[in-house]
Image (cartoon, rainbow, N blue to C red):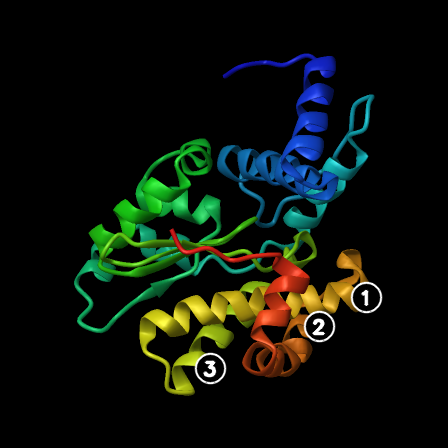
């Protein structure tokens, strides 16, 4: 692991913002998420209390992200099934898994750092191995198919890392399948609409105030705009979409 000085980190952040158009909020979210997953892996968070201290410098926002993620940690069904992962392989019906990086680490029996450093290749490998559709949640969630195709989702924002958001995601994917989309399209469209709904909520309320209920409430508007104004939605919220 490379250790950077404070000055080097400031220069890296500045370069990311000025040269690549990455927002400061996105960088803060990623930093806080990385710390959270280390805590999750080393200590666990269920039924525990934590006190977070932020050192000198501009670290308060990172600490807030860590606190929010610890507070919003919910059920852990994927961790339970990861103990006997062959149950997924043996299923006759299609399976959709929606892990965050900590859960993905347990599915693949690797460290959280390995997940974060090899997101695409790991999703490809595990989706093929388990014959399952895998949505690796996080900033720009990945959607992996059993045939090793991986899509990078562009919708969503850091405010959606809140308790119950994953449950809304599961329901959105199920709703798309219920509307008649094939499973592949239902997964991909459900992930996008879930994020788009969060973006609509953030546009009106700000990212800091979003709850899972807000994401759910904005879903009908997201679906209508997706159907009626797709080109405008892409241009306004996401600039452009590419299939590589």
Q: Position of residue 92 (x, y in %)?
A: 17, 71
Q: Earlier in the sequence, mark 2 or mark 3?
A: 3
Residue 57 vs 227, above or below: the answer is above
Query: In this rendering, would 145 be left or right of 55?
Result: left
Query: In this rendering, would 81 be left or right of 55?
Result: left
Residue located 79% across and 23% down the image: 55
Does residue 84 appear in the picture of this structure?
A: no
Residue 89 vs 67, above or below: the answer is below
Q: Secondary structure at mark 2?
A: helix
Q: Residues within 10 Å of mark 1 (few under 14, many from 20)?
A: few
202, 161: nearer the viewer: 202
Q: Position of residue 168 (x, y in %)?
A: 56, 71
Query: In this rendering, would 82 be left or right of 27?
Result: left
Q: Position of residue 31 (x, y in %)?
A: 64, 35
Does residue 92 appear in the picture of this structure?
A: yes
93, 117: nearer the viewer: 117
Spatial separation of the CA atoms under disc 1 and disc 3: 25 Å
Q: Secondary structure at mark 1?
A: helix
Residue to which mark 1 is pinned: 205
Q: Secondary structure at mark 3?
A: helix
Question: Which of the 4 quarters of the picture holds residue 90?
Answer: bottom left
Spatial separation of the CA atoms under disc 2 and disc 1: 9 Å
Q: Which mark is residue 221?
A: none
Q: Which mark is residue 214?
A: 2
Residue located 72% across and 27% down the image: 14
Residue to which mark 3 is pinned: 175
Q: Tell me whether circle 2 and circle 1 mark residues in contact (CB < 8 Å).
A: yes
Residue 48 vs 213, above or below: the answer is above
Q: Residue furthest bottom?
A: 179
Q: Tell me whether circle 1 and circle 3 mark residues in contact (CB < 8 Å).
A: no
Residue located 70% across and 34% down the image: 17
Residue located 41% across and 56% down the image: 243
């Amino acid at each position: 692991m490379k250790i950077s000085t404070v000055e080097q980190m400031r220069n890296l952040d500045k370069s990311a913002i000025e040269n690549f158009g990455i927002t400061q909020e996105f960088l803060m979210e990623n930093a806080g998420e990385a710390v959270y997953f280390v805590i999750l892996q080393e200590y666990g968070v269920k039924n525990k209390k934590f006190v977070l201290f932020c050192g000198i410098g501009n670290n308060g926002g990172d600490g807030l992200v860590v606190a929010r993620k610890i507070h919003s940690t919910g059920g852990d069904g994927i961790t339970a099934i990861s103990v006997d992962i062959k149950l997924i392989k043996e299923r006759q019906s299609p399976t959709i898994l929606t892990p965050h990086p900590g859960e993905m680490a347990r599915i693949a029996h690797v460290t959280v750092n390995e997940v974060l450093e090899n997101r695409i290749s790991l999703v490809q490998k595990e989706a093929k191995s388990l014959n399952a559709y895998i949505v690796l949640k996080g900033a720009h969630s990945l959607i992996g198919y059993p045939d090793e195709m991986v899509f990078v989702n562009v919708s969503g924002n850091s405010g959606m890392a809140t308790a119950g958001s994953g449950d809304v995601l599961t329901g959105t994917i199920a709703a798309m399948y219920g509307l008649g989309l094939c499973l592949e399209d239902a997964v991909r469209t459900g992930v996008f609409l879930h994020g788009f709904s969060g973006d609509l909520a953030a546009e009106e309320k700000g990212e800091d105030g979003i709850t899972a209920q807000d994401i759910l409430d904005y879903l009908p508007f997201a679906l209508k705009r997706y159907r009626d104004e797709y080109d405008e939605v892409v241009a306004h919220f996401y600039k452009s979409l590419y299939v590589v």
